[in-house]
Amino acid sequence: MPNATFHFPPDFKWGVATASHQVEGHNTNNQWWAWEHQPGRIAEGQTSGQACDWWLNAEADFDRAAAMGLTTLRLSIEWSRVEVAPGQIDTAALERYHEMLQGLRDRGIEPMVTLHHFSDPLWLTEKGGWTNPDVVPYFSRYVDQVVQALGDLVTLWCTINEPNVYATMGYILGKFPPGTQHIRTAAIVLRNMLKAHGAAYRTIHQRRDDAQVGLAHNIRFFDPADPKRIRDRAAAWIQDLWFNRTTLAAVWQGWWLPPLGFGPALSVRRTLDWVGLNYYTRDLVAFDRKGDIAGLARTVHDETAEPLDGGYGELYPKGLSRALEQLARLGLPIHITENGIPDADDDQRPRALLLHLHQLWRTIQNNVPVKSYYHWTLVDNFEWTEGWTLPFGLIELDPQTQTRTPRPSSDLYSAIARGNAITPELLDAYAPELRPVLLPG
Ligand code: IFM
């Protein structure tokens, strides 16, 4: 099939994903702002500052998304703006979010709203953050306020972004606030996040019959560095259990897996109307008692694979179809809530985008019900511990001047979204080396 076009389903949606702290600017009332201002926490001592200026002018980027032909956009609500102190709601902040969501609707863009994406109000941190079991009712109380205020404009709700990443980075690797390295605390945090998800699921449905509620789960593959070494296989299995399996076992099967516990998780069972996949890369795992992964292992990379910039991992598009096939077993609609790579000069992104979307197309042909794809991200934004050094945007941003410069990938993505297909012409124009790979013969 040397000239085949890969068509996506007629109702498929194309979008981009963002998060409040990464784009809004001046989120001074959360734990990330405090963390950024401690010496040595962020690459090159950078801070989020004005970020992408969305609090004042998200609409300019909504115009860009609409001009690209995108039909959906995922953003998050900043808890620390909405609930400035325990139980104290800032109605002006909710009004601003309402205005932003109306702005998306007016441009023909359906919003997906995330309720928690890594940032916590400082008052919550002072109460122990997600280690405190009271976080479950606190989160529901905040969610209830948001759904009352914004529910007329939102159907797609994402309760929590990547609970596994939040718990791993903040409580095992110590790279995110609060910088803890303690597995038992990480397990408490993840368990509380999943309970909070379950409670929020019910809260949202109590307010809105039309709501479709899910969470964004990051799947990362942990394959043994040497499949013949039983200790590599065991170390990979443990990482896979912790990172990939515990979350869905709880919120879908209704079962706590170690180290979260062992036994029924009835309060959170079946609390998904859809499942979100954030997919980026995979690790090869070598058993190593002196390794940086909890004294269990170290990560190595496939020497034949293309490395991603900034040590972000390896280019592994096949992982997208592997992850989707795993999620398909849940029997739920799937949204790809994030996928992208860091690439300042855009020399890798067009190829990576085409390879990932080809894997997506193949998976959809096998009747896996994927409904939408959200590229991470529209405009370079504040990449947490990596600051501004890992640019994921289709559009380049100079955070000092707020100048935006579209990268070639933004035209490619726009053409795919508008045509709802990958055509041979796009392959030839953006990654001719892929033609023999994707269109052999
Ligand atoms: O920027 C992050 C996002 O906040 C969560 N998922 C991964 C992205 C890229 O690292």
Image (cartoon, helix red, strand yellow):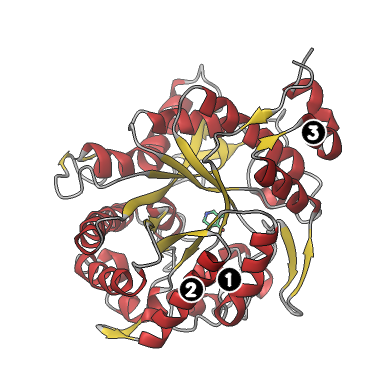
Q: Is residue 276 visible?
A: yes
* On screen, residue 245 above or below 227: below
Q: Nearer the viewer, residue 269 or 101?
A: 101
Query: Which residue is at a point 61% across and 79% down the rendered structure image?
Result: 57
Tell me which numbered mark, 3 or 2, is placed earlier along the sequence.
2
**Residue at disc 1, secondary structure:** helix
Label 2, label 1: how far apart the Cα atoms are: 13 Å
Q: Is mark 1 within 8 Å of ligand 1?
A: no
Label 3, label 1: how far apart the Cα atoms are: 31 Å
Tell me which numbered mark, 2 or 1, is placed earlier along the sequence.
1
* On screen, residue 285 above or below 265: above
* On screen, residue 140 above or below 8: below
**Residue at disc 2, secondary structure:** helix
Query: Which residue is at a point 58% across and 77% down the rendered structure image?
Result: 39
Q: Which residue is mark 3?
A: 427
Tell me which numbered mark, 3 or 1, is placed earlier along the sequence.
1
Q: Which residue is mark 1?
A: 23
Query: Which residue is at a point 50% across and 35% down the rendered structure image?
Result: 221
Q: Is mark 2 within 8 Å of ligand 1?
A: no
Q: Nearer the viewer, mark 3 or mark 2?
A: 3
- When asked about the image quadrant of residue 429, the answer is top right
* Total count of labels: 3
Numbered circle sitting on residue 32? 2
Ligand 1 location (quadrant) = bottom right
User: Callout 2, which amino acid?
Assistant: Trp
Q: Nearer the viewer, mark 2 or mark 1?
A: 1
- 384 on left or right of 416: left
Residue 182 position, x and y percent, is: 35, 56
Q: Nearer the viewer, residue 3 or 248?
A: 3
